[in-house]
Amino acid sequence: MAVGDPVSQSDNSHSSEVPGGWGPALDDLAQRRVAARAMGGEERLAKKHAKGQLDARGRIDYLLDPGSFRELGTLVGDVPSDGIVAGAGRIDGRPVMIGAEDFTVLAGSIGPGSSSKRYRIAELALAERIPLIMLLEGAGHRGGGGGGRAPTDLLIQAKCSGKVPVLSAVMGPSAGHGALIVPMSDFSVMTQDAAVFTAGPPVVRESLGEDVSKEDLGGPSVAVPSGLIHNVAPDDETALDMLRVYLSFFPSSAWGYAPHLPAEQCNDQGFRSTDELLS
């Protein structure tokens, strides 16, 4: 069973056990939770797993401490989790806020509900003085209107800068509004098959009449030399490991201190001269 498999998180029916006529309503909520956790459905999830990729919930489960994730807005929107899984969790015992775009649901596009969730997790990260992590694989704002909000999540994400660590991982095609947190991140990684851009190849084709691949537009060969991306990883797991390691060197906020280990748990050999360290 894959990490984050919705079957392992199913809710049971208790309609016959609940007094006051609340049973049917609670059963309906349970069914909606199961549908949300099923993400884009078995077929789309199978295609993603066949490529060696984790799904959105699997990525969160891999990065966070086991059992620490508390989801926010599971039932938001007309589609499963409105295309983004978001909430709070812990990494090495330290609280973080996290959002993972779900490409199996409308290409991870941003609708009204997901826009609100993106704003809320950044708002909580700033208020609670804890890191903000975004796992990106989405198409930007959803067509049909209604996807925007005021104030936008970009404003609160920008306010996080210099106050709490902001980390991002591009784990597939990331376009438009969703990708704009990458240049605001303190640390950004991408997988070798990912791409990041403000507008994808179809928009370039319609606007300029030029055919360009997503790799040439925003793959690692473009994003790393530009300074947009710091590290490139061969797969999802390695990218997430990089986020965990990076975070281990920093405090949870500008008001805290970096974590430390007892001397007996460190591999450092003790005091060394500057010349030795630089050689």
Image: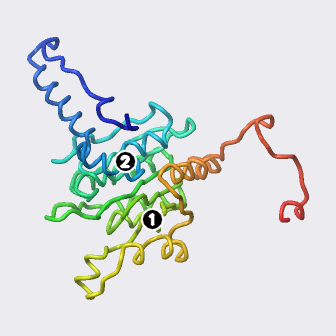
Say whether residue 81 is visible: no
Decide if residue 63 is on the left or right side of residue 11. Answer: right
Question: Where 217 falls versus 130 (above or below)?
Answer: below
Q: Name which residue type carries label 2.
A: His
Q: Is residue 3 above or below residue 276?
A: above
Name the secondary structure under disc 1.
helix
Q: Residue at x 41, y 51 (%)?
A: 53
| Mark 1, residue position | 182
Amino acid beneath label 1: Val
Colour pattern of the rendering = rainbow
Residue with the mark numbered 2 = 49
Instruction: Report the side of 12 relative to 54 (left or right).
Output: left
> On the rendered image, what quadrant is the C terminus found in?
bottom right
Are circles 2 and 1 on residues that touch, CB within 8 Å? no
Please state the horizontal and vertical placement of residue 218, each as a whole percent of the image: 42, 73
Classify residue 67 as left or right of residue 86: right
- Measured as percent of width and height from the top left, residue 160 is found at 47, 57
> Which sits earlier in the primary sequence, circle 2 or circle 1?
2
Can you tell which mark lies on residue 215? Answer: none
Which is nearer the eye, 203 or 41? 41
Q: Position of residue 121 (x, y in %)?
A: 38, 48
Q: Residue drawn at (13%, 64%), measured in percent from left and top?
A: 144
> Callout 2: few (<14), some (14-19), or many (20+) C-alpha neighbours within 10 Å?
few
Q: Secondary structure at mark 2?
A: helix
Q: Position of residue 1 (x, y in %)?
A: 37, 34
Q: Residue at x 47, y 58 (%)?
A: 168
Q: Is residue 224 visible?
A: yes
Q: CA distance from mark 2 to mark 1?
A: 25 Å
Q: Residue at x 40, y 38 (%)?
A: 3
Residue nearest the viewer, comparing 8 with 149:
8
Considering depth in this image, is 26 or 189 the residue closer to the camera?
189
* Residue 225, quarter of the rendered image: bottom right
